[in-house]
Image (cartoon, grey):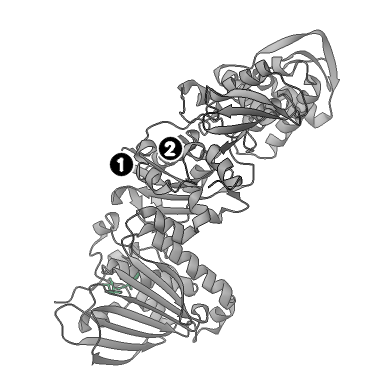
Amino acid sequence: MGKIKVLSPEVISKIAAGEVVERPSSVVKELVENALDAGGREVTVEVEGGGRKRIRVTDDGEGMSAEDALLALQRHSTSKIEDERDLFAIRTFGFRGEALSAIAAVSRMKVVSRKDGELAGVELKVEGGVLKGTEAVGCPLGTSVEVRDLFFNIPARLKFLKTQGTELGHIGDLMARVALANDPIHFRLLHDGHLLANYPVREDPSSRLAEALGKEACAKLHPFRIRGGEVEASGYAGDPGFNRANARGIYLFVNRRPVRDRLLMHAVLEAYRNLIPQGRYPVTVLFVELPPHAVDVNVHPSKWEIKFSDSEAVHRSVIQSIRGMLDRAPWLTESRASGKEDESRETSGAYGESRMPGSFPLPAREIFDLGLRPNAREIPAESSFLGQIAKTYLVFESPEGLNLIDQHAAHERILFEKLGGEFSRGSISSQPLLLPESIELPVDEAQATEEHLPELERLGFVVEPSGECTFWVKSVPEILAARGPIEALREIIRGIVSWGKQAGLPRPFDPLLQMMACRGAVQADQALGPAEALALTADLRDCHSPSHCPHGRPTSIRITVSDLEKMFGRK
Ligand SMILES: Nc1ncnc2c1ncn2[C@@H]1O[C@H](COP(=O)(O)OP(=O)(O)O)[C@@H](O)[C@H]1O
Ligand SMILES: [Mg+2]
């Protein structure tokens, strides 16, 4: 009895329909997933001409009998599910029974396979979906599927393929993703006979990370893990300072399946909110694990998209796991230079099993009442103040070495959290002006002001209409009282006007608070004495996210004694 069965029409009708084969990398994806589902431990991908000429994927998995191999090439034939219910308990990468037939229809395919216990293997040749020959052959256990001349019979599709380099890039990226999520498997990628990527099986999981993303990136990534209910979120997330212009450094997986998912992407970006500059993207590898019934993988023909049954729980777990780790700022406490990296990764349980709720990512109202106290502090309490450089950087000595603080960035962080705290508890402390000031605004701004008087009051500005487009400003935020409060108010009103243009978005108070913090903070080029400097660092130590200013610049830089020893050639 063969393993593979053709699905019933009822099940077929429930399977997300559409094209599986878009480009060479989609062929590689399907073939590699089959190799993994077959239990392969060694998976080799050979491509020629960026995959346009030839792709061959070889595995040492369970193989197929001659009978099964023939069935496998039919549409909707699969050994992975049988009935409708199985669609909600999918533990394999494949389940649609479509890939082999779809690829065979648009290429010249050769399948060679041998099952354990059988003396001879089978070789099948198919061209444009037509079986050209079957024979018994001698071959190793496992399966190899070769795909030549993709789209040879569909010139319109062929035209849409990109250059060899671009297609190869997609394949390399895909292999990195697959390798990241399957570290017990050895993967190799060869192009025109040259080994392009090698992912051997290693003890230490972070070596796979280094092979997929590069050593340099790996050193800036920190492990996180959180489990809440049925959802587990884990992975590696980068220092906020290590950010990019696009989202290509964000790798998302659900039950080890690489996915493109807006919800997860949003959660990752939320976790970094106010830590990296707007419009920049972090580097993050995220694994979400949850029971198969809690995720629908049957929404997209090539399985890149998924649907969660409780998307809110997933969103929350991801934010909390990453933000919890970031708030501890492990990049400030981990010793990398000394080669202790592996050790610190193994003991990652320390920030591993955290249940700490994320702070900023929550809506502003709830942020500051959680009483969080992250343990990573910029400046050890026993540090001493040495002086100021360029009237901008504060210099401290600590047992570990030297700490430099950017006084403006640090104060900005402090004020931002202070303002956020006041705002979330009600309103920002304000101070009446001795003489109310009158301002005149352009029509659109005047209208926005009228509509948002309560919001302005929460931000610390008490404003009253006094005519068509004129207003009395009666009170201003305390921290801005001496720092051009009216100018700040005008800027805030302009910010509010732009809310109207982003209909549907939650009202982004953060940028307004950021702006106020920036205006209220001590500026660069301002002399500070020891008492002020120490007070500033003490306040910074008490922040939830002391490492960066709200725009994403670092607040402090640490130079350890060991760094100094290296610089002076002692080590
Ligand atoms: N590399 C392989 N090793 C063993 N069996 C395979 C391999 N590739 C495909 N098969 C068999 O062929 C069937 C059809 O494959 P495919 O068309 O990709 O559909 P699916 O993976 O969705 O089941 C699979 O269910 C599996 O039984
Ligand atoms: Mg498959």
Q: Quadrant of the N terminus?
A: bottom left
Could you say where residue 490 lies in the image, as x and y percent from the top left? 79, 26
Distance CA(mark 2)–CA(mark 1): 12 Å
Kindly state the secondary structure of the residue where label 2 is placed: helix
Position of residue 59 relative to residue 357, above or below, is below
Answer with left or right where residue 545 lies relative to residue 258. right
Examine the image and state in which quarter residue 175 appears.
bottom left
Answer with left or right where residue 3 lies relative to residue 188. left
Tell which of 563 and 208 is nearer to you: 563
Position of residue 494 relative to residue 32, above or below, is above
Answer with left or right where residue 268 lies relative to residue 290. right
Could you say where residue 507 lies in the image, as x and y percent from the top left? 62, 32
Identify the amino acid type marked 1. Glu
Residue furthest out toward the front: 570
Whether the residue under disc 2 has CB within 8 Å of ligand 1:
no
Q: Which residue is mark 1?
A: 230
Could you say where residue 480 lies in the image, as x and y percent from the top left? 74, 19
Q: Residues within 10 Å of mark 1 (few under 14, many from 20)?
A: few
- Inspect this view and state whether residue 222 appears: yes
Q: Which residue is mark 2?
A: 316
Q: Residue at x 47, y 56 (%)?
A: 260
Q: Residue at x 48, y 75 (%)?
A: 24
Identify the amino acid type marked 2. Arg
Tell which of 440 and 183 is nearer to you: 183
Position of residue 290 relative to residue 362, above or below, is below
Q: Name the mark on residue 128.
A: none
